[in-house]
Image: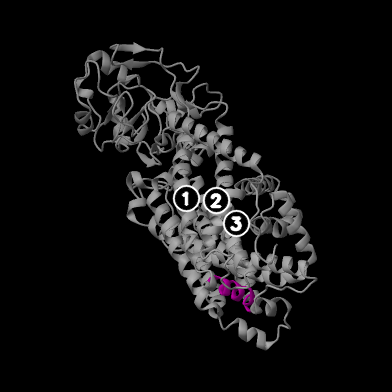
């Protein structure tokens, strides 16, 4: 420092990593373009028919925009695929797309016939109006093949329910329909519990559940916009204004609100898990027989999260009460700085909109990447025959069904896409932190006064310094944090050993970059030295300050999660094609987005505290232990006796 002012003779640092970050963005765009080219989000929600068309898709060989439910036409194929030692797979069973699951007739036999084509001169609308039944129009040859369960028409013997857009058979054959079928000369139809279990097993496979979770995010995009972006923006600004003007009461407001919100969110989990009230999660789309009880993995996952939330709620409640009286000091210092540099409250709106644009692109690319792949005919050993309306005869050459085949590198593409989101988020947050740190440092080294050498709007001056000199350092810093956090996520057993390093060194690198203009490695070295030499001073303010800030972020994110629960609990998301499989993923995404937005805005307070502390330590280092530029309030906080007079001054607000 020259004369207490941030040096202006800076140079660009860590340019290599800036170029690496630019190359990363190019790779992200290329990777996403693969998803946009190969993916179709409808695959995450609906199944394929026997021709490889996606139910509900208007762009296949047949317009299926209103036909969203996959129905297995031949019950014997469903049964056969579930038996041991069978070479027939359910994926090869003949399926078509319908508007709703058919039901057996009360005094006869209903039929579901293949898509009308060839000699069957019916439009798709007429076929739907006739409940998919044109058995009376069949030629004797077609009727005979239908009675052999070879189509084009198949009897509806078992009732079925719409479970996540697949008609699941209920192993409770209609006696009337089965009797009429036998009187017509139809072949024997197998009755067994496998009729239930086979389709249910496919619907509940891990890959199918994951696809539905990702599809839930796409269907609930209005909830994400309201609860993931608009609501946390409003709440974060309100919280900053409150901590600016009523700092003395914010501790108790935050603690009480935090406990109310975490209890409320936990209670919603209990309701949807079916442990409280009469509004549990259901896997059936639309109305169903009240005597039919069908569960899914989604309910099991929701109950597991409910138990976890209960444990977290108890620990958080007891911890917040224990520390409530010890977190007043640090916020008072930050409130003083915010009052002097008022543009700090407004600045986070800029990175907020940058993040919003990035996440819109990222979520869209995610839906397409998870659904990317080629629809190809299966390679099967099935021994079956079916009537082909175009060829006007029974053929045994096309028994195999269709599946989405994923390319070998799709897993790597998805992992890269997920890591790219984390790195980009860390980069944007780090840029915001560096700008705020530079603004606060300008305030500190000007002794809290307007100096001719300090620009009138230090926030914009700090933004200019970041853009001109420090983007490379921010890129390498955010990359290091992203890589370390990713490794820690994989190797969770090492988390406790790395916890202390994460709590000290990583938090201060960006501040030293903003203060000194050094490269990432040089700033890291300086920050580490200052931390070790002033560990008691830093701990006195920073630790308790981080606690109240963390609780504040949780308050914002919990409120977003609670409001997301309320929005998802409406009729729109509980019925028809908009029904979500579970509120779990949309609520968690809103929770995470709310926390990220809160972090962006609360970084004003957090950076103010950390930058002031580091500037104070640097000031003391350069002046033989006596800081020359520290504001009086900071001197009292860091070096005061901590008596009643000090506490009274701190809680009076700026």
The crowd level at tag 3 (other Cα within 10 Å; few <14, some 14-19, many 20+) is: many
Residue hosting label 1: 354
Magenta span contains residue 334 = yes
Q: Examine the rendered structure and indicate whether residue 611 appears above or below residue 135.
A: below
Instruction: Tell me the CA gap for discs 3 and 2.
Output: 10 Å
Residue at 56 percent of width and 73 percent of height: 335
The residue lying toward the viewer, choosing from 147 and 429, is 429
Q: Tell me the chief SS of the magenta region.
A: helix
* Of the image marks 3 and 2, the number of the one nearer the N terminus: 2
The residue lying toward the viewer, choosing from 88 and 123, is 123
Q: Which mark is residue 70?
A: none
Q: Examine the rendered structure and indicate whether residue 280 appears above or below residue 215.
A: below
Say what secondary structure mark 2 lies in. Answer: helix
The crowd level at tag 1 (other Cα within 10 Å; few <14, some 14-19, many 20+) is: few
Residue hosting label 3: 434
* Of the image marks 1 and 3, the number of the one nearer the N terminus: 1
Q: Which mark is residue 428?
A: 2
Task: Look at the numbered discs 3 and 2 and tell me whether their residues touch, using CB distance below 8 Å.
Answer: no
Task: Look at the numbered discs 2 and 1 and tell me whether their residues touch, using CB distance below 8 Å.
Answer: yes
* Of the image marks 2 and 1, the number of the one nearer the N terminus: 1
Instruction: Tell me the CA gap for discs 1 and 3.
Output: 16 Å
Instruction: Tell me the CA gap for discs 2 and 1.
Output: 8 Å
Residue 306: quarter of image: bottom right
Q: Quadrant of the N terminus?
A: bottom right
Span highlighted in magenta in the image:
325-338
């Amino acid at each position: 420092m020259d004369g207490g002012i941030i040096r202006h003779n800076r140079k660009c640092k860590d340019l290599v990593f800036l170029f690496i970050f630019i190359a990363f963005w190019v790779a992200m765009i290329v990777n996403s373009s693969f998803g946009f080219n190969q993916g179709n989000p409808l695959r995450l929600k609906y199944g394929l028919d026997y021709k490889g068309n996606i139910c509900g898709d208007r762009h296949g060989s047949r317009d299926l925009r209103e036909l969203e439910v996959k129905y297995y036409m031949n019950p014997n194929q469903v049964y056969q695929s579930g038996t041991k030692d069978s070479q027939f797979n359910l994926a090869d069973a003949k399926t078509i797309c319908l508007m709703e699951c058919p039901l057996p007739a009360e005094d006869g036999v209903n039929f579901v016939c293949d898509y009308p084509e060839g000699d069957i001169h019916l439009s798709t609308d007429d076929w739907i109006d006739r409940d998919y039944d044109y058995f009376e129009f069949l030629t004797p040859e077609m009727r005979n093949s239908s009675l052999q369960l070879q189509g084009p028409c198949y009897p509806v013997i078992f009732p079925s329910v719409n479970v996540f857009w697949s008609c699941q058979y209920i192993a409770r054959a209609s006696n009337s329909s089965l009797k009429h079928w036998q009187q017509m000369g139809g072949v024997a139809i197998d009755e067994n519990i496998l009729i239930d279990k086979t389709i249910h097993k496919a619907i509940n496979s891990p890959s199918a559940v994951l696809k539905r979770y990702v599809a839930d995010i796409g269907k609930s995009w209005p909830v994400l916009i309201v609860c993931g972006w608009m609501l946390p923006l409003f709440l974060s600004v309100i919280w900053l204004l409150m901590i600016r003007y009523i700092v003395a009461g914010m501790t108790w407001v935050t603690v009480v609100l935090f406990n109310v919100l975490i209890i409320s969110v936990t209670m919603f989990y209990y309701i949807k898990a079916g442990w409280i009230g009469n509004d549990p999660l259901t896997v059936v789309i639309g109305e169903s027989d009240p005597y039919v009880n069908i569960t899914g993995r989604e309910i099991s996952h929701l109950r597991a999260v409910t138990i976890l939330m209960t444990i977290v709620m108890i620990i958080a409640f007891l911890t917040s009460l224990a520390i409530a009286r010890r977190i007043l000091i640090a916020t008072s210092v930050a409130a003083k700085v915010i009052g002097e540099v008022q543009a700090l409250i407004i600045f986070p709106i800029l990175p907020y909109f940058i993040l919003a644009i990035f996440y819109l692109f990222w979520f869209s690319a995610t839906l397409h990447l998870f659904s990317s792949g080629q629809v190809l005919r299966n390679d099967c050993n099935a021994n079956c025959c079916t009537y082909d309306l175009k060829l006007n005869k029974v053929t045994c050459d096309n028994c195999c069904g269709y599946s989405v085949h994923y390319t070998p590198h799709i897993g790597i593409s998805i992992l890269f896409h997920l890591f790219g989101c984390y790195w980009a988020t860390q980069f944007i947050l780090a840029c915001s932190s560096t700008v705020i740190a530079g603004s606060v440092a300008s305030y500190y080294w000007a002794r809290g006064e307007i100096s001719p050498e300090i620009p009138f709007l230090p926030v914009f001056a700090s933004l200019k310094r970041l853009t001109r000199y420090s983007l490379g350092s921010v890129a390498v810093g955010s990359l290091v944090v992203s890589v370390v956090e990713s490794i820690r996520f994989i190797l969770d057993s090492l988390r406790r050993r790395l916890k202390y390093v994460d709590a000290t060194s990583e938090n201060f690198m960006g501040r030293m970059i903003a203060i000194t203009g050094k490269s990432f490695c040089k700033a890291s070295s300086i920050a580490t030295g200052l931390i070790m030499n002033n560990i008691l001073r830093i701990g006195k303010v920073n630790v308790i300050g981080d606690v109240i800030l963390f609780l504040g972020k949780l308050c914002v994110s919990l409120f977003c999660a609670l409001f997301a629960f309320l929005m998802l609990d409406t009729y729109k998301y509980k019925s028809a094609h908009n029904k979500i499989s579970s509120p779990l993923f949309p609520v968690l995404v809103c929770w995470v987005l709310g926390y990220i937005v809160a972090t962006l805005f609360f970084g004003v307070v957090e950076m103010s505290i950390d930058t002031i502390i580091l500037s104070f330590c640097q000031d003391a280092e350069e002046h033989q232990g006596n800081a020359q530029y520290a504001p009086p309030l900071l001197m009292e906080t860091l070096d005061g006796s901590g008596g009643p007079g000090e506490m009274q001054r701190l809680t009076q607000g700026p």
